[in-house]
Image (cartoon, rainbow, N blue to C red):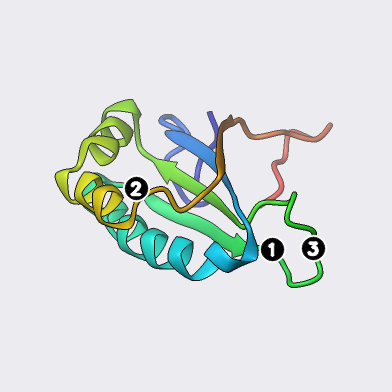
Amino acid sequence: MGQASGEDRSDPGLTIGFHGYGPSDRAAAARAFEDEVLALMADHGGRVLFRGGRTADEPETEPLELHVLWFPNEASLASYLADERRLAAIERHGEVFTDKRVVRLDDITDATGSTAR
């Protein structure tokens, strides 16, 4: 799987892409929820490598939020997903996205063996 820049290449960890879809009128609710739950990642060894939102001129068929996340291993991801504070935030905020997609990412190397970072 992919790795964060500066991580030990012998244990690349997990790099995950998250796409959260929804209408523009849900952007504030989605942002508040994600602000809360993404802050918990560090407690499980994870990091947010990138977090962005669609621009105002993009259609609502594009993701409302897109994240690139990194965890050191499967156990840390599982621990984050099961975190009681995260589950409580889901209960409080309700479903903030109309659709969600999660993609596990691998580094892509060019002909020289380099990865773009």
Q: Secondary structure at mark 2?
A: loop
In the displayed structure, does residue 24 sit left or right of residue 3?
right
Is residue 8 shown above or below 88?
above
How many other residues sit within 10 Å of disc 3, few (<14), some (14-19) or many (≥20)? few
Task: Give the residue drawn at x 41%, y 48%.
Answer: 95
| Mark 3–mark 2 CB contact (< 8 Å) | no
First reached walking from the N terminus: tag 2 or tag 1: 2
| Mark 3–mark 1 CB contact (< 8 Å) | yes
Give the Cα separation between the discs numbered 2 and 1: 24 Å
| Image depth: mark 2 or mark 1 in front | 1
Task: Give the residue drawn at x 69%, y 63%.
Answer: 54
Q: Say what amino acid the circle numbered 3 marks.
A: Glu
Give the Cα separation between the discs numbered 3 and 1: 6 Å
Q: Secondary structure at mark 1?
A: loop
Task: Give the residue drawn at x 73%, y 51%.
Answer: 62
Q: Say what amino acid the circle numbered 2 marks.
A: Gly
Disc assigned to residue 54: 1
Residue 79's x, y, as percent?
A: 23, 35
Disc assigned to residue 33: none
Q: Secondary structure at mark 3?
A: loop
Residue 44's x, y, as percent?
A: 24, 45
How many other residues sit within 10 Å of disc 1, few (<14), some (14-19) or many (≥20)? some
Task: Give the residue drawn at x 38%, y 40%.
Answer: 71
Residue 78: image quadrant is top left
| Image depth: mark 3 or mark 2 in front | 3
Residue 67's x, y, as percent?
A: 54, 52
Observer-nearest of 7 and 68: 68
Residue indicated by mark 3: 58
How many other residues sit within 10 Å of disc 2, few (<14), some (14-19) or many (≥20)? many
Disc assigned to residue 46: 2
